[in-house]
Amino acid sequence: MPDHPPIVAVIDDDESMCQALSRLLRVAGYEVRTYFSAEAFFDESALERANFVVADIQLRGMSGFDLQERLRRERPALPVAFITAHDEAETRAQASASGCVAYFRKPFPGKLLLKAIAKAIASIPESTHPISEQ
C-alpha cells in the first residue's frame, strides 16, 4: 500500500464545483488536483499521478467523453466518474458504454462519490498504481 494518500483529479469548468469537491475529497483523506479543462489535466501530466478522475461531461474544449476515450488509450486502468448537470438518457447510455465507474447528476450526495472512489481505488491492481513522487 502506498504511504501517500490517493490522488483524485477533479476536472470541471465550474470553479465552485471544483472547490466543493476538493473540500469533500480532502476531508475524506484524498490528495486533490483540480483542473478547469481536460486539456489542462493532460498539459500538467497529471495522468501519470492520478489514482481516480472525476470529470464533468460537458467541458469547454475536450468533453468528458473525449477525455475518457484518451484515458482508455493511455491509462486504461484509471477509473473515471462522470458528473453532469444535463442528465439525459443518451448521455447516461454513452457514459455507461464508456466504462466509467460511476455517473452522477448534479447535485449529488458526496457520500455516493466517496463510496465509488473508495471501491474503485481498492479494486485497482497494485501493479497499475502510479509511481510515488518521493
Image (cartoon, helix red, strand yellow):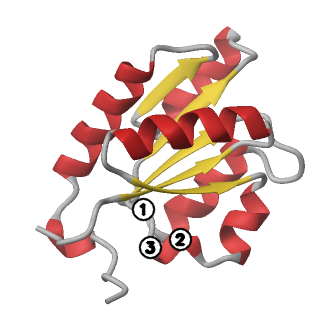
Q: Which residue is mark 1?
A: 76
| Residue plotted at (25% across, 69% down) | 4
Q: Which residue is mark 3?
A: 49
Q: Is residue 56 something one can see in this rendering? A: no
Q: Position of residue 37 (x, y in %)?
A: 78, 54
- Left or right of 103? Residue 45 is right
- Label 3: element kind: loop
> On screen, 37 above or below 20?
below
Amino acid beneath label 3: Arg
- N-terminal of the pair, mark 1 or mark 3, is 3
Q: Residues within 10 Å of mark 1 (few under 14, many from 20)?
A: some
Displayed quadrant of residue 43: bottom right
Residue at the extreme left: 1
- The numbered mark at residue 47 is 2
Q: Could you tell me how far apart the alpha carbons at marks 3 and 2 are, in whole angstroms? A: 6 Å
Displayed quadrant of residue 76: bottom left
- Label 2: element kind: helix
Q: Position of residue 73 (x, y in %)?
A: 53, 67
